[in-house]
Amino acid sequence: MRRALAAAVVVFAATRIAAAEPAAPSHGDPIDPRVLAVPTAWLPGAGVAVATLGVDHRGDTTAIAALGLGELAALELGSDTDVRACRACTASGPDGAGQGDAPSPVALGRAAFRLGAGQDAWFPGMPAIALGVRTTFAAHGHAVHDPRVSDAYLVASRALGVVRVHAGADAISASAGDLRAAARLRPLAGLEIHPPMYPRSSLLGDLAWEPALDAQRSPQLGWLLGIGVRYQALTWANIELAVRARQGDELGASTVMIRVNAVLASSGSR
Amino acid sequence: MKQANAVVLATVLATGALARAQPAPPDPSGSAAGSPSIPAAPAASPPGPATAPAPAPATGDPATAGVPGAPADPDGLISGQPDTPLDPYAAAAAPARRGPPKPPRPPLDFPEVLTTPTGWLLPAGVLYSKDAIDTGGGVTSDNRVGLGDVAEFGVATTDQVRERQTMADKPERIQPYITASFRLGIAENRLFDQQPGVTLGFRKSFERNHDDEKTRIAELTLVASKHLGKRAALHVGGALWDASLQSTVTEPGQAPPPEITLHGHDYKNQIRPFGGFEARPLPRSEILIDLGWAPEFCYQCADTDKIKLRPELSWGVRYEVARFMHLESGVRVPDIGNFNLLDAQIFGQVTFTSFALKGAVDSLK
C-alpha cells in the first residue's frame, strides 16, 4: 500500500514538472537581459528583479542584478570579468602578433541603465528596442591603473517563431590611466533558437566587443564570440552552459562558463 | 443515570434558549456592522445621526426608569421602535463619518525634473526628500517643504560642482556642497487657463573650503512648466549664475589673494537657458530628460577661465512604487559640451513625499 502511494506521489510530481511552462513575463516579452554577452532589448517588468551568477573554468566570476523600473527601463548593478588587461601586451594585442604577457581578466564593477519599449509597443511587428548605457564604478585585481570602460548601445530584439534575433550597435570607450580610447562603434549580434521538440532548451550564439586594456598603449577593441545552451530548469530560473572565444586567443584559450539566471518578482510587481 | 442525563440535557437546552433570547452585546469598537459574527444592530438603523443616542424617554435606559413623568415602556417598544442597546461612544465616533469622502489626491508635480528645477511648487505642508547615489561616487540629499502653496524651502547637498587644477586635468567633484534654496511661484492655471506654472527660485551654497580654495555658488532661476495633455510636460527656464573662488593660502606679510567671481567678467557668462521634458507613457512611469548647467572651478587657469559653467545632460525614468515613494534612475553626462562617454554616470535615487504635515495643519483649521 505504501509503495503504491509513494509511486502515485512520484508520478504526480513528475507530471507536474513535465507540465510546467517555461518562465514568461506577464507582458509577453521574454526578460532575459542578455544572450551571453550581448544585451537584449527585453526589459524586466516593473518591480521584477533578475539575478545572474556565473563562473568560468578559470574561476572568473560574474554577478549581476537587474531591476525593472516601470516597464520602461531597467537598472543593472554587478561585476564581471569580460574585460582583459595586461601591463605589456603591446606585442600581443587583439591582433595576435608577437609575444607579450598574457592579458588577465579585470573584475569590473559596472552599472547600466536601459530604457526601451517592448515588442509591438508602437506598431505591429515592431521589435523591442533598448538604449543602454553601461559604465564602470569599481575595479579589482587589475594589472593597469584606473581601468574604466563605458559603452552606450542601441539594440533591437524580436521573437520570430522558434528564433529570437538581436542586433544593434555599441559605442565603446575605455581608458587605463591616462591612456584613453575615444568611443568607437561596433556591431552587436545575437541569436536564440528554441527547438519545438525541446520546449525548455534553447541554443544561444552572440558576437560582442570588449576592450583590451594595455598599460603601454591606448585600449584596443576585440571581438568576443560565444555559443551555448540555456535550459529552463524552473519557471523562475534557467541555467546556461557556454564556450567563449576572443580575438587573438588560440582555440585552446577559450573559456567554458556556467551561469544561472533567476527571476524574482515581488508580489506587487506588474 | 438516564434521569441525570435528561436533566443535564434539559438544562443545556434551556440555558441555550435563554442565551439566544438575549440581545446582542454592543461592539466595544462601535462598528458591529464590520463584524461578521455579530448581527449588525446599527445596520438596522440609518447611519450617521440615527446612530446617535436617542432622547432619554425613548431609550428605555435604566437611568430614566425612576424619573417622574417618564412614560412606561412595558413592552420595550416606544413609537414602534425596538429598544436596542446603544453604543455610548457612538456620539464621539459619528462626526468622523460625516461629510463627503475626500477625493483622491492628484499626482504630485515634482519640483525637479532630474537636475533642473520645474515651474511647479510642492503643495503647502508637503515634505519632500530625495537621496541619490551614482557611479561616480556622488551621494546627495535634497530635502524640501512646501509653504502655503506659493513657496518652497529646501536644504540640499549637491555633487554637481567640480574642480580641476589645470585644463588638462580630469575634473573631480567637490562634495558635499551644501546649498539652501527658496522658491516662490504661481501654480499652473491659477491666474488664467493655459497659464504655465511659474517659479522664481534662488539657490545659494554655504562657503566651501577645499584644497586651500574657498568657493561659493549662487543661482537665480526663472522657470515655466506646462502640462501638454495628461501625459507630457515641458519645462523652460533661464538661470543667472554667480560663483566665487579665492585661495586661502597667503604669503607672510602679503594681502590675501583677490577673489575671482563670475560676475566680475562678461555678464553673458552668467546667463544660461535650461529645460526639460517629461512623458508619462504608463500611469506610474515617466521618462525624463533635462539639460542644465553646473559650475566648474579651475584653480591654476587664467582668471577668465577659473570659473566656467558646463552643460549637463540627464535622462532617466521615474517609477511610482507607492504614493509616497518614487524610484528614479538614469544617466547623467556632466559635460555634454566635451562629450566623453567615460564621464557618463548611472544614478539611482529614491524620493519620499509626505502629506503628514499637511494633514496635521489641515486638521487644525
Image (cartoon, coloured by chain):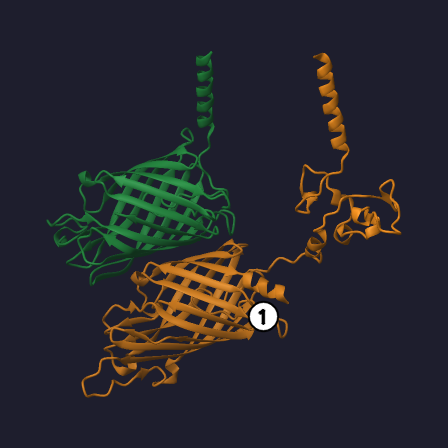
Chain colours: A green, B orange
A223 up-or-down from B131: above or below: above
- Image x and y of residue B276, in percent: 47, 67
Query: Which quadrant is the C terminus of chain B positioned in?
Result: bottom right
Number of numbered discs overlaid on the protein picture: 1
Question: Which of the pair B69/B17 is nearer the observer?
Answer: B69
Relative horizontal placement of residue B339, taking residue A264 as reference (left or right)? left
Relative horizontal placement of residue A261, taking residue B279 as reference (left or right)? left
Using the rendered image of the protein, determine whether residue B120 is visible from the camera's viewpoint: no
Question: Which of the pair B331/A162 is nearer the observer?
Answer: B331
Q: Which residue is mark 1?
A: B188
Using the rendered image of the protein, determine whether residue A96 is visible from the camera's viewpoint: yes
* Residue plotted at (18% across, 56% down): A144
A109 up-or-down from A12: above or below: below
Question: Which of the pair B194/B197 is nearer the observer?
Answer: B197
The chain identifier of the residue carrying mark 1 reads B
Relative horizontal placement of residue A159, taking residue A242 as reference (left or right)? right
B54 up-or-down from B278: above or below: above
- Image x and y of residue B248, in percent: 25, 79
- State which quadrant residue B137 falls in: bottom left
Relative horizontal placement of residue B186, taking residue B266 as reference (left or right)? right
Which secondary structure, mark 1? loop
Question: Which of the pair B29/B353 is nearer the observer?
Answer: B29
Q: Amino acid at mark 1?
A: Glu
- State which quadrant residue A215 falls in: bottom left
Within-10-Å neighbours for mark 1: few <14, some 14–19, many 20+ = many
A200 up-or-down from A175: above or below: above
- Image x and y of residue A157, in percent: 41, 46
